[in-house]
Amino acid sequence: MNLWNLLRYISMKHLRLQKAQIFMAVAGICLGVTAIVSIGVVNRSVIFSFQDSFNRMIGNAALQITGAQSGFPESIIEKVQDVRGVQYAVPVIETDGMLVDGKERSMLILGVDVLVDTQVRDYSLTGESADVPDPILFLAKPDSILITKAMADREGFAIDQKIQVQTVEGIRTFRIRGLLNPEGPAKAMGGNVAVMDIYAAQMAFGKTGRIDRIDVSLRKGENLETVRQAIMDALPKGYMVDTPAGRTRQVENMIAKFQNGFDFISYLAILVGMYLIYNAVSISVVHRRKEIGILRAIGCRRKEIMLLFMGETLMISVIASSLGVALGLLLANSLVGAFGKVISETFVRTSVTGIHVTWLYPAIGLLCGMITSLIAALFPAMSSSRISPASAIRSVPYTEDKIFTTLRLNLGGVFFIALSFLLFHIYGFSGPYLLAAQIMLAVGISFFTPAFLNGFVTLFNRVFASRLGSAGRLAGLNLRKNLTRNAVAVAAVFFGISVFVASSGYVHSVKGTTLNWLDSIIKSEIILSSGHPGSSTNAQIIPLPANMSRELEKVPGVLAAAPWRRAFTDYQGSKVLLSASDYTQYPKRSHDGAGPGFMKNQTHFIPDGNRVEISEAFAAIFSVKKGDEISLPTPAGPVVFKVAGIVVDYSYDSGVINMDIKTYQRYWGDMLCNSFLVHVEAGAKVGDVRDEIQRRFGVDRKLYVLSALEFKNEIRKMLDDMFIFNYALNVITLTIACLGIIVALFASVLERTREIGTLRAIGMLRRQIYGVVVLESVLMGLAGGSLGSVAGIISGWLNLEGFFVASLGSAKYYLPFGAILWALLLSAGLSALAGMIPARRAAKTNIVEALAYD
Amino acid sequence: MIQVRNVSKTYLQGKQEIQALHNISFGMEKGEFVSIMGPSGSGKSTLLNLIGGIDQPSAGEIFIDGSPLHGISDDELTLIRRRKVGFIFQFFNLLPILTAEENVGLPLLLDGVPFSRIKEKACRLLENVGLGLRTDHRPEQLSGGEMQRVAIARALITDPAVLLADEPTGNLDSHISEEILELLKNLNQAGQTIVMVTHDARAASFGKRIIRLKDGGITEDVSVPGCDV
Ligand SMILES: Nc1ncnc2c1ncn2[C@@H]1O[C@H](COP(=O)(O)OP(=O)(O)OP(=O)(O)O)[C@@H](O)[C@H]1O
Ligand SMILES: [Mg+2]
């Protein structure tokens, strides 16, 4: 095949000779692929680790019965056991515990009925435990605990050693009775698992008489669906009877919603990479015009020329994509920990120990890298095949018709923008379509960059150029000379900056809105909790007994201490968050009459009135209005509540229900709380009160006692962690944009060798040449930066509406002024930096060589 | 061997029409060595490009070795260039990235022949033009005269029906020019058909026949004195 000859004898040599340009193109695609692969793999790993832990925990049970997070009465077990077809109905307590000694590692404590649990789950103990006749029976002693071999090795624990664990009842001492081999549940959560007897666990974790879950195994030959239905019929409403797969799917969907945004932004990075490839290939076509002419003259067909460039691009993209996959895996490996922590703190208990790589994301990365490169190369390759053989003969080519005339580009821009509006019109603010619409919009705007750059340069020439002397005039002229190519570099900057501004605007608004909301609901001076203070949901919290408020109020300086319980419950098949606090006693005693989690003067919470407030998200998802009645499942059966108001509450996107804690305790029988909101007396010093609380309660239990300010800082930090990918993506897209500028300027410097030589010959200083090139770069950067800022502001607002407002409730859009300033500084600064490389090259131009005939 | 019948060529430069060739006809036999002369802008290069299939006429017909160059697709035209025509240009037009032998072998590489099978012939041709020791040099390591010899070897590798040269000595000093012209003359004596465009009357005298162009038309078509046609 003669294409093979072409690639081997022409392309390979070019690749070897034009290392710098090729490097940029490779880097561009490589980074795009890195973004796609790393984000995909991290997302996949988090979900995988969740599924894996979940499946290990559930063993070989066929069904799982869950109720409200508060737990449900033990009597339910018998009802389930009596259902036909059920073989074993095994009760489980699943709760968080915290190792107090050493590194304060949190772990999952599984409270099980040792007599029957082995029917569902596989445990085995290590050899060292074997001298005990039947270690499982030892669990009947309430201080017995089994930990995993992995944890023992890590923490340096041995059999019979005593360890201290934070429980609801305070810090308790347990004795290690055996070590679990790494199999079954012992391998879940990265080995941070301990097993106790269910009775002891109920006592220690405030669940006396109640259980969290029942795992059910079926008799042989029974139909899963029939048994499931039978169990549902046997139980009061509000219990979920689900297959393990069904349960994981719910959580997966929840995590996926959070991750989707990142997934799409990563594709934007590769889009920016496309502009780079487009430019690199078109530049290479221009430089090799003569070569192409010669090849055509001595008998190379059009198709072959085109295939030549496509083949080169393919080679480059294969290398770049493979590198990108490797880099992506590395990046994923280093980000997965932080991201797993965020998921664990905000959504669901997981312990992501490493990346889980399937062929899927590397394959997607490779394909995306290759396909986008080929698409980007298609147009310049097509134009290469139009070069006439006569170009070989003339050194200055006659003008040929371009594929991308400004008119066609503008039409293309209009087309994409119209497409974006159409998508928006049809699908509104719904997730994936919104992102697609945004990408179309950005692509559309980018088609106008030649026109915009032209205007920008005109403005520059009129207003500033004269003040910058000959350098200014030359820079302006040069930018115009290769308008399209420079515009492509501008477009790359435009993308980078618009992603940067959009994500900053989004993050800024989410942070501002959330913190503002916290300000409005947290009226107390001190927040006290036993786990991660930012955890709004269930993860990593060891609840406290609600009646601890009485002792707290005995602390001098404490005016009132309101327990705040946040627990999940089921509502119409999905999980919603119940948020309960003291809305009756506490406001009376606080300074301004406002309750915790509660705006001023809202008095519709009457303890006996069965009234609730719902979040905007809840109202939207379940179409509930003020004054409606909703039926909530309680462990004792459904209870009807009246909706007294709809409030802003961002803590959970599937809906939040606020109620008084007395009401909650009465119906759910749950006497625990996640935290206390502590009001300090008028004259008392917050710091002193805080220290006193820590002194009195800190011996017995590990507590986070934070001032309102510290609490908000914790939340801020958590939000920052949540957006870690945004930051990583910003860096990636901006880097690609810089590469875009370097590529474009390098090309124009090379093309101008002769001109620069002439300028030098007639007396232009090296640093003047240098200045011209850097100035061109800065102008391109600023053009892209300003256009990108505008687009970014719009798209940040769209994101806020589409991803935050649509799922969590109304929010204010905070214009990211800081980010815009940064964007302009960055686009000028980075482009100046990027321009320095080609500028050095230009300044070094050897006059004699430049003027000699090539 | 070559038939040119009523050929015209107009270029569109913007809105302006440029008549580069105007109703030209002539014929050539196998083994001829024709020099085309004329002032700058008279259409010499245009004519040569038409004969070589680099460009297509606006009107008229051209046949080379029996095949028509008009009314065929670009691909077919390209294959004629590849297999039947050898080009020598004023500025050599070697690919700077290839070595001398690779440049020479390029037309066959385009035809999909592996280089291992081309190498021997390429080296032999280089030897014939006096560059047997320069096969691995790249164009930048060669002098102008040497580069033109490489270009001649390249033009010959496909054993073309006709060798077309556009001012092959235009960029070389008189001493080197002489050698190149001598080389062409020897090739012609071995039976190679050659068409050469030149400004230089001395260069033209190496051929057997001279066609003069002016303003896109033939003004004279004569045999070189002392040559038996
Ligand atoms: N691709 C083209 N587009 C437009 N005009 C062209 C093109 N090629 C040639 N011409 C014009 O056609 C005319 C003849 O050009 P040509 O190159 O054939 O002249 P020439 O005789 O070879 O001149 P010289 O001796 O200077 O090489 C000129 O006026 C030239 O400007
Ligand atoms: Mg000419």
Image (tube, rainbow, N blue to C red):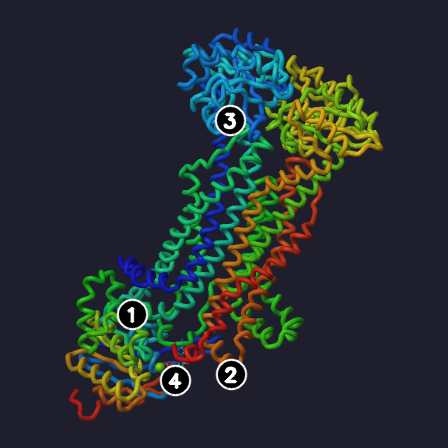
Residue that carries the numbered disc 1 in the rendered image:
A298
Q: Distance between the residues labelled 4 and 2?
A: 32 Å
Q: Mark 3 lies on which chain?
A: A
Q: How crowded is mark 1: few (under 14 residues within 10 Å), some or many (20 or more)?
A: many
Q: In which quarter of the image is the N terminus of chain A?
A: bottom left
Nearest the camera: B196 or B137? B137
Q: What element carries label 2?
A: loop
Label 4 is placed on what type of residue? Gly
Circle 2 residue:
A762
Kind of residue at disc 1: Ile
Q: Which of A183 and A396 is in front in this view?
A: A183
Image coordinates of residue A392 in percent, x first then y, are: 35, 73
Quadrant that contains the C terminus of chain A = bottom left
Looking at the picture, does residue A851 appear above or below residue A497? below
Cβ of mark 1 under 8 Å from ligand 2: the answer is no
User: Which labelled disc corresponds to residue A192?
Assistant: 3
Q: Mark 4 points at which residue?
A: B41
CB of mark 3 near ligand 1 (< 8 Å): no
For image coordinates 33% across by 68% down, the residue present is B97
Residue A317 drawn above or below residue A761: above
Q: Nearer the viewer, mark 3 or mark 2?
A: 3
Q: Does the residue labelled 4 lie within 8 Å of ligand 1?
A: yes
